Amino acid sequence: MAKTSMHFHWSNKVSNEDQETPTPINPCHKPNVSHAEPHKPPPPTPSPLPRKKLQAVTVARFRSVLTAIRQNRANLQNTLGPKVVGTLFGSRRGHAYFAFQKNPTAQPAFLIELQTPISGLVKEMASGQVRIALECDKEEEKTKKVGNSRKLLEEPVWRTYCNGKKCGFAVKRECGEKEWRVLKAVEPISMGAGVLPAEKTVAGEDEETMYMRAKFERVMGSRDSEAFYMTNPDSNGAPELSVYLLRV
């Protein structure tokens, strides 16, 4: 029986084990390589205001707040209550002014100039009771929705009626130096009428100032109506002068 010779190549086997087996490369595989995003510059920061400009803005805001506080305080101090002081005054040949004050020393909360001469009102009052009605128009609906509604005493223009007769218009005025001088002159007078000494005007003419001063009772009917009744103990309960404010 013939013998088959078998040869084992141990050296080759050992040498093959020592060699590293190459890793097959998959052509579809994409290597996991992290690509860093390009560096973006930070957004520009707003340049701060200069120090002087910042201080000026702060001071302006502070002053506006102080002004608003002073105005609100003045309005609260001059707000009319149920008892007020009323003064009717004007030069003999001029228009009549009507002022309502919270007290004799306060700024008038309501001051209007009537087109009616004060001499005519004095004659009406001498003949009997006088009722002055001041009417103004209501605001439009669009203005109300915006919220720009004003108080009744802040209306600028009024239609004037005296004892039922139309007598022009009345205009709201600010208390100037001349008006305040008259109110200060009659400040000690709680009730009465008279004539203040004449003062020379720019034209060089002498003008005497007539006045009538009394206490009034204020009655608020609604947001659009108020009434002022002169309280006179010698009139048997019937006021000699009544002022009605109506928004129609």
Image (tube, rainbow, N blue to C red):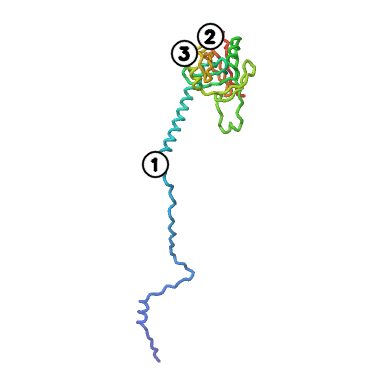
Crowding near pointer 3: few (<14 within 10 Å), some, many (20+)? few
Asked which quadrant contains residue 51, the reply is top left
Contact, CB < 8 Å: mark 2 with mark 1? no
Quadrant in which the N terminus is drawn = bottom left
The residue tagged 2 is 233
How far across and how far down the image is residue 201, in percent? 52, 19
Quadrant in which the C terminus is drawn = top right
Mark linked to residue 199: none
Under tag 3, what secondary structure?
loop
Inter-mark Cα distance, 3 to 1: 54 Å
Contact, CB < 8 Å: mark 2 with mark 3? no
Would residue 123 appear left or right of 63 to someone viewing this image?
right
How far across and how far down the image is residue 177, in percent? 49, 21
Asked which quadrant contains residue 225, the reply is top right
The residue positioned farthest toward the front in the image shown = 204
Under tag 2, what secondary structure?
loop
Q: Is residue 236 above or below residue 104?
A: above
Residue type, numbered disc 1:
Arg
Mark linked to residue 51: 1
Residue type, numbered disc 3:
Pro
Look at the image and tell me whether residue 50 can be seen: yes
Instruction: Between label 2 and label 1, give the one nearer the viewer.
Output: 1
Q: Is residue 33 above or below residue 248?
A: below
Crowding near pointer 1: few (<14 within 10 Å), some, many (20+)? few
The residue tagged 3 is 188
Crowding near pointer 2: few (<14 within 10 Å), some, many (20+)? few
